[in-house]
């Protein structure tokens, strides 16, 4: 499996898991409509608590990235993700935090655009691997 959790990271494990799942969707390791591993099996495979996996899955469902039914969690269809108000609000909050940091640390627009381009290239597979992102 492509998910890598860093237990000694300052980033909470559920946040790392959410990020890794999103990267997996972006890299087409999971397609829209695909089922994700069960909470129990993923927790066992990664050596983490089931409650941590459940929290990540539920937060991704709240964002509209995943949907839950009686059979488990599935990747939402793209149209559902794009129209989800919670997704829009979450993205705006993340962008606001990044722009606040940009101003606090006095990052110029030129450098900021350069960083954005580097990240975008990496996400398209033209640079670093997803583990480096």
Image (cartoon, rainbow, N blue to C red):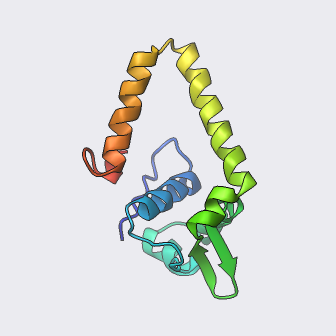
**Residue at 34% in and 52% down:** 130
Residue 109: x %, y % from top left = 46, 17
Front residue of 102/33: it is: 33
**Residue at 53% in and 44% down:** 11
**Residue at 39% in and 67% down:** 28
Residue 96: x %, y % from top left = 65, 30
Front residue of 98/32: it is: 32
The answer to which quarter of the image holds residue 26 is bottom left
Q: Is residue 25 visible?
A: yes
Q: Is residue 52 visible?
A: no
**Residue at 57% in and 14% down:** 104
The answer to which quarter of the image holds residue 63 is bottom right
The C terminus, quarter of image: top left
Can you say whether 43 is above or below 38 in the image?
above
The N terminus, quarter of image: bottom left
Image mark count: 0
* Residue farthest toward the bottom in the current orientation of the protein: 71
Front residue of 133/124: it is: 124
Residue 128: x %, y % from top left = 27, 45
Front residue of 133/80: it is: 80
């Amino acid at each position: 499996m492509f998910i890598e959790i860093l237990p000694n990271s300052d980033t909470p494990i559920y946040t790392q898991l959410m990020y890794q799942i999103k990267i997996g969707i972006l890299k087409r390791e999971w397609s829209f409509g695909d089922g994700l591993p069960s909470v129990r099996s993923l927790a066992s495979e990664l050596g983490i608590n089931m409650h941590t996996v459940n929290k990540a899955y539920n937060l991704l469902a709240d964002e509209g990235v995943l949907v839950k039914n009686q059979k488990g969690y599935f990747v939402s269809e793209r149209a559902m993700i794009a129209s989800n108000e919670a997704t829009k609000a979450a993205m705006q909050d993340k962008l606001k935090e990044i722009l606040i940091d940009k101003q606090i640390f006095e990052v110029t627009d030129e450098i900021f655009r350069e960083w954005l381009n580097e990240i975008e290239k990496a996400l398209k597979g033209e640079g670093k691997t997803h583990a480096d992102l």
